[in-house]
Image (tube, rainbow, N blue to C red):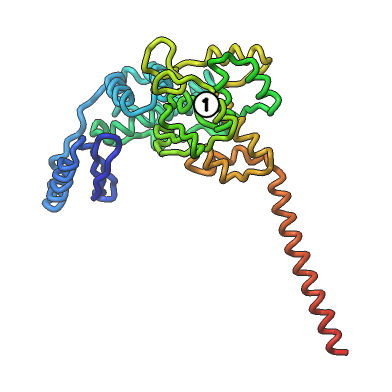
Amino acid sequence: MAIYQRGKNFYIDFRFKGKRIRECIGPSRKDAEKVIAKRKTEIIENKYLDIRKDPEPIKFHEFAKEYLEWGRVNHKPSSRVRELSNMRTLEVAFNNKNIHEITVWDIEKWKVKRKGEVKPSSVNRELATLKGMLNKAVEWGKLKESHTRKIKLLKGVEKRLRYLMPDEVQILISNCTDRLRPIVVVAVHTGMRKGEILSLRWDQVDFEKGIITLVDTKNDQRRYVPMDETVKSTLRDMSRNGEYVFPGIRKQGSHLLWVDKMFRKALEKSGIEDFKIHDLRHTFASNLVMSGKVDLMTVKELLGHKKLDMTLRYAHLAPNHKMRAVNVLDQVLSETHKVINLEEVRASQIER
């Protein structure tokens, strides 16, 4: 039996007759310790199943409200907006059902229907929201089992990879407004995400060490982003108006929230199509890889990826690294062959 913390709440985790059971106890670790001691006693006295009651039925839309309220505190703003949109779609399909009535067949039928309406990637995002919601229902004791664990995501969904070449970057920057230009420069030269840039504070920028320290990241892990001379000079030239590097326009003491409209106008002036602000991050990584001077592991660290799989999408941009690897092997085998031939020559000379 184990106790772990996720967010503000403590959970207990144990197995009973081969089945894994997790319970959300609350914000107190002492309460979690009491409950886990109680569960041990109940199992020893064969009373655990006798006193364990089935969860009370709860409608999909009612639990969706609870889940979204929890997400309002625990998820990032960008995730909450996406989650809210996904939930509106899910409520159309499952609104009249209790969450324990949702079967694998129900979800598969919905998945097939949605596949005919939207892109597979959209279906997968909606399914991810459904999975997250029902898994939380199990953790919170509102549901015995989530059938979404048996549902697979749609296959063949390729992640989007759109980037600009160096000359296109310069054209885009030249068409940015004074407010937008430093944001684009920082994005292209650091690979930081839009949210990380807009919420950046001056106390996170260390000009002496040439480092930007990111605390509130997508992976919830502290990340240190090196600044090149372009980023340093860009930030040094900016006027300081409060704690944020990019302060809000209307509300004093807040950071800039929306730059999408300004960005779209800059794209139109530059004649650049099918490009999003997040693609500036792809531009940073792609140009590093295409230079042939930076390996994928370094790119992974700079981007803050947890797994190398996420970085491997850029691997095809550096075909030369495979050629270099083969040439190294060729060189090793050739040298070995020369050594063997030399030894044969020496052996023949001794025999003579």
Q: Does any portion of residue 282 appear in the rendered image? A: no
Indicate the position of residue 323 as horizontal and vertical percent values: 73, 49
The three-letter code of the residue at mark 1 reads Arg
- Residue farthest right in this picture: 352
Q: How many marks?
A: 1
Residue drawn at x 79%, y 78% is 343
Indicate the position of residue 46 as horizontal and vertical percent values: 13, 50
Q: Quadrant of residue 251?
A: top left
Indicate the position of residue 144 as horizontal and vertical percent values: 26, 36
The residue that disc 1 covers is: 236
Residue closer to the observer: 284 or 99: 284
Q: Quadrant of residue 91?
A: top left
Q: Secondary structure at mark 1?
A: helix
Q: How many residues crowd around disc 1 within 10 Å: few (fewer than 14), some, or many (20 or more)?
A: few
Is 345 positioned to the left or the right of 23 in the image?
right
Residue drawn at x 41%, y 25% is 79
Residue closer to the observer: 178 or 190: 178
- Image quadrant containing the C terminus: bottom right
